[in-house]
Amino acid sequence: MSWPDTLIDLFGVALPIVQAPMANSSGIDMAVAVAEAGGLGSFPCAGLSDDKVREGFAAIRSRTTKPINLNFFCHDAPEQDLAREAAWLERLAPYYRELGVEMPTPPLKATIYRFTDATCATVEALRPEVVSFHFGLPASGLLARVKQAGCKVISTATTRREALFLAERGVDAIIAQGAEAGGHRGMFIETDVATQIGAFALVQQIVQAVKVPAIAAGGIGDGRGIAAAFALGAAGVQIGTAYLGCPEATTSALHKAALAEPGRETVIADVLSGRPARGVINRFIREQGLIDPAHPAYPLATPALAPLRKAAEANGSGDFSWFWSGQGAPPAMGVSAKEVTRKLADDAQALLG
């Protein structure tokens, strides 16, 4: 079996490896390192204002001319419900008292940005080679403008039905996000986490359903996983957790320690942010449960928990932290992102012959 050229030709990269855009865990250094190694480096923009997106992309461009992916979120604007927010905060009050932290008061303020008309104008000015979306796609007019700017567009599907939706709207490639993947589920049609299946099963479903190239994501962290994804019809892979131990990652020391645990347990839960996401299980998840519709709408659940996280982490505890992680093996610690990328590619190519 040969090394697939589909993404190499589509994105203008040397390797069909996409670095997952991990907000809070990756940034400029990671995107540059992976791009220089031949993969598609990704810059997470959902937590940045448009000005910060421009600043970050300028910094990346000062260090590499290789293709770069800018990633944005397309979640619905949260409906502010003061009573619901107050009830959730009251539920968290014992934790605030325990840690001696002042509890925020409604209205809670979102710290995650949506893809807007102004953001689209920023993309048109920057003209990155690739733009990726999470939680679906922006409005058709905005999507058309991104494509007219010459950017290749990719988005995440977690089911066959979501893949069909994306293909019908002209995306250039689909990220098949299996249930093993760390971080937020890209779910935008499905609402029940029970619908989420593994990456390899999902890749096969998408390859059979659409003609758009599929990028396998979830639990893939070595050459064997990459080779297996290609054998099932994937045109490329997206890898996240394997990069979290790199010096270029902005992962906290506590997060890295949790990732290094050989027997770490991860779960898909929505109580940390308001949307289903896979991360390392901790005290808060154990005590509050995995899924609870009582939390504020995404992303307003995060600021309700953020003061607790800050206080606990200052004491060396991850009891209230969102340590996103996939189900793959623990990442290598201290190995550069460039080295990780090259090893992934070399090991996969050796297996593919």
Image (tube, grey):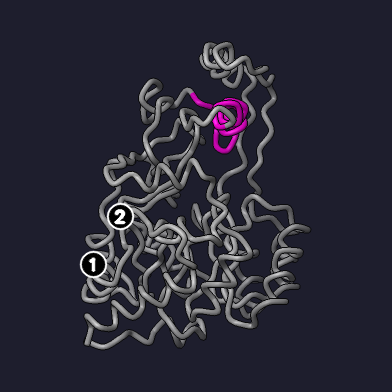
Judge whether 178 appears above or below 315 on screen: below
Which structural element holds mark 2?
Answer: loop
**Residue 133 relative to residue 77: left or right:** left
Residue located beneath label 2 in the image: 328
**Residue 183 relative to residue 226: left or right:** right
Query: Which badge, 1 or 2, comes first in the chain's sequence?
Result: 1
Percent coordinates x, y for residue 118 in the rendering: 75, 59
Q: Can the viewer see residue 301 in this picture? A: no
Using the image as rendered, state which of residue 61 and residue 338 is in the foreground. Answer: 338
Q: Residues within 10 Å of mark 2 (few under 14, many from 20)?
A: some
Residue type at mark 2?
Gly
**Residue 163 relative to residue 11: left or right:** left
Residue 52, quarter of the rendered image: bottom right
Judge whether 172 appears above or below 12 on screen: above
Q: Which residues are magenta?
A: 295-313
Q: In the drawing, what numbered circle is on residue 285?
A: none
Percent coordinates x, y for residue 353 in the rendering: 22, 88
The residue shown at (55%, 72%) is 33
Judge whether 72 appears above or below 337 on screen: above
Percent coordinates x, y for residue 2 in the rendering: 26, 88
